[in-house]
Image (cartoon, coloured by chain):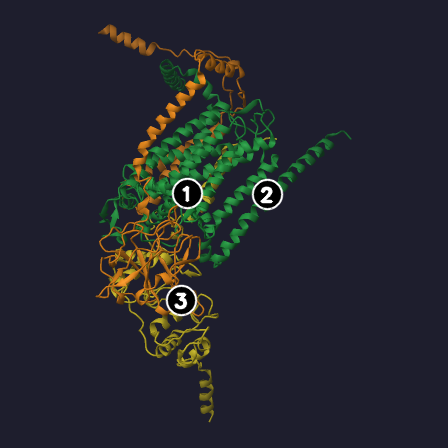
Chain colours: A green, B yellow, C orange
């Protein structure tokens, strides 16, 4: 009986394989693909966390598009939520309130979608840190790295667009700030802003329609396409690996897709989905029904962007008060430094890094083996300093809440941050470099000690 | 004779403060606000005409007495008994009259109107869910512990740096709505789960990193391997 | 008919598994020992996942269950978590974990050369390659520009004049949210009001005002703004000159001797504007003072604009100092 069941199972597989290969010619490809070798360090799975978050985003996103109304047409709320009853809202805001408060499972899917966005960007950042600190961006993988950075940029825009579609008080304020940052770009800012918004802020239905199409079509397709390119490049060159007993620059060692890797990556996929849906159900995020609708003449204290834009609000608050003018021409309005210059600089450095490192070290060889962070003390130290710099700016963005919670003077904090933001990275640089060097020295001592102990007496 | 002495001894234990607004004022307020609430330059403003409304607000919240006139008053433990409070309030109210303690009726307010008015007049400082906020040089406190009477008193008085909204600007009916909303905001609709304090994306970002990222990195660590030496 | 039946029977029953006989050496995946305990764990996990997943539609349909979002999230989340755990157990205990080797790819100098040669020889008939390339590039660029040109229809990219325009001009009455005109008597000290231009669209940056009253003796307006604040009533744009948020905070001292002066504050980055001096920046990142609107009183005591703002409203841009505000 058991043999019969197994036989039937095998028959199904055989029939399927034969059918597909005859019609696609794919058997040689699949044979190679299913035995493709994946180096198996745990930190190589971080990119997949981002990938699976993206899958959850698209799935939950599609569901939301079936209910969301991307229209600013005014409508009166007649639902059960009392604080909004009888008030005039935009259809966009009302449909989101409906999804959250009236449609069954709507809130679960909406919250999962929003958590997935936050986690998507966080996973990309953690993945980026891994790539950076292990030198995985080096030749021949620079292209993969650039594609990844591009995806990060698009992910930031995509998230911002997504939560700004809702036309609630909080995101509306965020859009005004985005508009102002665009306006602050020297020479062309105002023109660009008029283009994007079809006139001055708030832009009305034209802007909402564009934001919607950008968020549900243009950006996801762009990210999806780049993702496919990114994964293809990774597969084509094989994944990098750490030095090991058999792992060398020439030989990649790891587990094959089938049977070892597939269940593991599936497990990770389900784990990501599990965490996101659990958070979506148990932890409230962006309760827009509490914020109320957006009006140009209204604002609330404590408004913040989603975490991945927090570095920008910190920067905007830290820059002292000045517009750079040349006669009557305003060359650089104030928000430019924190809102545009700062991120442009950060991404500029990240994009240029492989080139910079290659120039400075003169290293033009292929690198399939990864550095442990300590193996490249300068890169690690500069990286830690750089990310410390960004992080301090990020912290400055919550100085007002620190004041409310802990009574630390806001002005004092701003001044403290203005100093720390330059001092701490320098300190971090030297401390990190020292730690790396000490760790390396310690290993040399260990090896020598082992050699000495192994010698016959 | 013995009974007279006992009576005298008993009287000695009666607290001096009881029944004496003047004495309470003398012990706690006069140093900054001066005799008869005239005010002392650089130390304390005049209390003439502020009425029971303002006095009651500042005293029942513990805002007053204030140690240093340059400090921001904030809620603290009230050191007076209910009776002492009443005495002190009555005494301060006696300085040139002034408005009485208000009697708001939040149940008669409209919640939607309340949120609209709160957004317009209050949320800029106190935050849309009344969780408090920052105003240059001061904190606009969270309102979770404010009672309806305190809210009404604060709105009409404008304590410390807060604006002062009269009946002309915010009618009593509208005030009822605002108070109803503030009461509601203490326990808003949090059907999405753990509310994280109703302050928006900052705690959401903390959860993203300290819950999701930690859990998922841990999962990666379980699935993957470590560097083999 | 009978023949067909027999044929069918033979077809169904006569088929035997013709498994290829492989010897151990030809195994693609190495053998591994079974682990029934792990299998039981996986069965349990799948079972638990099934139960949780089934719970989802039950909770969904059963309205009486409160906290729907939480329970739905738990149901699907736990189901996914159990499946994940099952996959991980399978991966770590029920399939063989092999350590295989493969070659890292190199560059392919022969193919690269061939490609170079291909391109070179493909163009071997051309006599004026550079010129043709230039012409082609020119055509391509021009075409690209042509294709992009309709993007200019997205908005007034070359016309920024609307950035100077506000709906205010002399004589327009200040009204509240309900459309009632503000009278000077309505404006009290120690508080702030939001005003809009009568009959204008309110959802534009040039519309909302914040109105406050100071004692005339407290005013320290520049000479050019003499008369802008009748009875000490001041009107400013409600839109912050830093990044466009509504200035929804007003700070008024109860005890001016020790407390900071009256100021309007923006809740986004805390730009603080002194009202007595006509909106100058005293704290925060705003690069321009808050535009002030001159006021006048009508015969009936109503507040009206006496002109346009002292400068363009809203965030700074390259031309913000080149012209004043225009109606």
Query: Residue A324: image x %, image y %?
Result: 45, 48
Query: Residue C15: image x %, image y %?
Result: 35, 10
Identify the subunit bearing mark 3. C
Identify the subunit bearing mark 2. A
Can you tell which quarter of the image residue C235 is in?
bottom left
Crowdedness near tag 3: few (<14), some (14–19) or many (≥20) residues, C-alpha within 10 Å: many
> Nearest the camera: A103 or A194?
A194
Do the residues at pointers 3 and 1 share their chain? Answer: no
Residue beneath label 1, please? A185
Residue A276 in view here: no
Task: Please give the name of the residue rendered at 36% of the width and 63% of the height, measured from the top-left corner.
Answer: B146
Residue beneath label 3, please? C253
Mark 2 and mark 1 lie on one chain; the one further toward the N terminus is: 1
Residue beneath label 2, please? A429
Identify the subunit bearing mark 1. A
Q: Quadrant of the C terminus of chain A?
A: top right
Query: Residue A382: image x %, image y %?
Result: 57, 40
Element marked by disc 2: helix
Label 2 – label 1 distance at C-alpha: 32 Å
Q: Residue furthest top?
A: C3
Determine whether label 2 and label 3 are within 8 Å by CB.
no
């Amino acid at each position: 009986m058991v043999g019969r069941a197994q036989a039937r199972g095998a028959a199904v597989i055989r029939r399927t394989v034969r059918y597909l290969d005859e019609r696609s010619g794919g058997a040689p490809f699949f044979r190679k693909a299913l035995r493709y070798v994946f180096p198996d360090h745990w930190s190589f799975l971080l990119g997949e966390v981002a990938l699976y978050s993206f899958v959850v985003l698209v799935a939950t996103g599609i569901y939301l598009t079936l209910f969301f109304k991307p229209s600013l047409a005014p409508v009166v709320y007649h639902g059960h939520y009392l604080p909004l009853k009888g008030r005039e809202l935009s259809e966009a805001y009302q449909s989101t309130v409906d999804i959250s408060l009236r449609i069954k499972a709507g809130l679960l899917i909406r919250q999962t979608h929003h958590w997935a966005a936050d986690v998507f960007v966080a996973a990309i950042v953690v993945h980026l840190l891994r790539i950076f600190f292990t030198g995985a961006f080096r030749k021949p993988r620079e292209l993969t790295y650039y594609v990844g950075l591009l995806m990060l940029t698009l992910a930031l825009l995509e998230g911002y667009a997504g939560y700004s579609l809702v036309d609630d008080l909080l995101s509306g304020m965020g859009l005004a700030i985005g508009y102002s940052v665009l306006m602050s770009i020297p020479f062309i800012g105002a023109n660009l802003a008029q283009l994007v918004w079809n006139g001055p802020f708030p832009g009305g239905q034209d802007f909402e329609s564009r934001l919607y199409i950008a968020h549900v079509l243009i950006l996801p397709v762009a990210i999806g396409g780049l993702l496919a390119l990114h994964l293809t490049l990774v597969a084509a060159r094989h994944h990098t690996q750490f030095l090991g007993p058999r792992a060398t620059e020439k030989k990649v060692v790891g587990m094959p897709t089938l049977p070892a890797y597939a269940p593991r990556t599936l497990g990770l996929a389900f784990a990501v989905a599990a965490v996101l849906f659990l958070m979506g159900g148990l932890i409230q995020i962006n309760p827009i029904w509490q914020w109320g609708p957006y009006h140009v003449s209204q604002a609330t204290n404590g408004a913040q962007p989603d975490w991945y834009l927090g570095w920008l609000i910190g920067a905007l608050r830290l820059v002292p008060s000045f517009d750079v003018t040349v006669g009557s021409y305003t060359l650089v309005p104030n928000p430019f430094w924190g809102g545009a210059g700062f991120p442009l600089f950060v991404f500029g450095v990240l994009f240029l890094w492989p080139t910079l490192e290659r120039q400075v070290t003169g290293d033009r060889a292929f690198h399939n083996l990864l550095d442990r962070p300590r193996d490249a003390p300068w890169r690690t130290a500069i990286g830690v300093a750089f990310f410390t710099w960004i992080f301090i700016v990020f912290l400055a963005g919550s100085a007002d809440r620190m004041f409310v919670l802990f009574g630390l003077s806001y002005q004092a904090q701003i001044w403290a941050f203005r100093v720390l933001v330059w001092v701490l990275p320098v300190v971090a640089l030297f401390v990190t470099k020292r730690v790396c060097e000490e760790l390396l020295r310690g290993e040399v001592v260990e090896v020598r000690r082992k050699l000495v102990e192994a010698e016959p007496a | 004779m013995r009974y007279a002495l006992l009576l005298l001894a008993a009287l000695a234990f009666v607290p001096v403060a009881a029944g004496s607004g003047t004495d309470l004022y003398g012990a706690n307020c006069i140093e900054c606000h001066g005799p008869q609430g005239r005010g002392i330059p650089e130390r304390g403003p005049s209390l003439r005409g502020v009425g029971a409304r303002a006095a009651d607000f500042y005293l029942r919240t513990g805002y007053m007495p204030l140690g240093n006139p340059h400090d921001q008053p904030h809620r603290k433990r009230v050191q007076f008994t209910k009776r002492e409070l009443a005495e002190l309030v009555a005494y301060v109210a006696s300085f040139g009259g002034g408005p009485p303690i208000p009697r708001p009726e939040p149940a008669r307010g409209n919640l939607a109107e309340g949120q609209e008015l709160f957004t317009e007049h209050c949320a800029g400082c106190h935050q849309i869910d009344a969780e408090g906020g920052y105003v240059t040089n001061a904190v606009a406190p969270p309102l979770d512990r404010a009672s309806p009477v305190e809210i009404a008193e604060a709105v009409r008085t404008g304590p410390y740096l807060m604006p002062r909204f009269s009946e002309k600007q915010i009618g009593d009916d509208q005030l009822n709505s605002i108070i109803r909303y503030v009461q509601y905001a203490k326990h808003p609709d949090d059907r999405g789960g753990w509310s994280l304090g109703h302050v928006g994306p900052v705690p959401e970002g903390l959860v993203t990193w300290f819950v999701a990222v930690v859990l998922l990195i841990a999962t990666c660590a379980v699935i993957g391997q470590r560097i083999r030496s | 008919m009978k023949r067909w039946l027999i044929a069918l029977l033979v077809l169904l029953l006569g088929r035997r598994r013709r498994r290829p006989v492989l010897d151990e050496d030809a195994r693609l995946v190495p053998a591994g020992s079974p682990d029934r305990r792990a299998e039981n764990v996986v069965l349990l996990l799948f079972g638990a996942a099934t139960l949780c997943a089934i719970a989802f539609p039950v909770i969904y349909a059963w309205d009486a269950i409160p906290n729907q979002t939480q329970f739905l999230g738990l149901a699907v989340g736990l189901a996914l978590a159990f499946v994940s755990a099952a996959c991980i157990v399978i991966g770590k205990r029920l399939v063989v974990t092999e350590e295989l080797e493969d070659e890292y790819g190199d560059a392919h100098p022969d193919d690269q050369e061939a490609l170079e040669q291909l391109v070179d020889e493909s163009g071997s008939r051309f006599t004026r390659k550079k010129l043709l390339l230039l012409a082609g590039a020119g055509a391509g660029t021009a075409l690209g520009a042509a294709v992009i040109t309709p993007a200019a229809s997205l908005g007034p990219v070359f016309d920024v004049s609307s950035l100077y325009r506000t709906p205010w001009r002399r004589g327009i009455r200040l009204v509240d949210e309900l459309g009632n005109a503000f009278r000077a008597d309505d404006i009290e000290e120690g508080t702030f009001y939001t005003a809009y231009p009568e009959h204008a669209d309110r959802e534009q940056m040039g519309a909302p005002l914040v109105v406050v009253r100071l004692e005339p003796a407290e005013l320290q307006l520049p000479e050019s703004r003499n008369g802008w604040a009748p009875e000490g009533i001041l009107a400013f744009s409600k839109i912050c000159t830093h990044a466009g948020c509504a200035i929804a905070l007003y700070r008024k001292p109860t005890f001016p001797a020790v407390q900071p002066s009256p100021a309007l504050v923006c809740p986004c980055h805390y730009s603080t504007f002194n009202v007595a001096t006509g909106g100058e920046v005293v704290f925060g990142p705003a690069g321009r003072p808050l535009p002030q609107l001159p006021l006048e009183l009508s015969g009936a005591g109503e507040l009206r604009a006496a002109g346009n703002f002292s400068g363009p409203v809203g965030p700074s841009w390259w031309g913000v100092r080149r012209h004043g505000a225009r109606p």
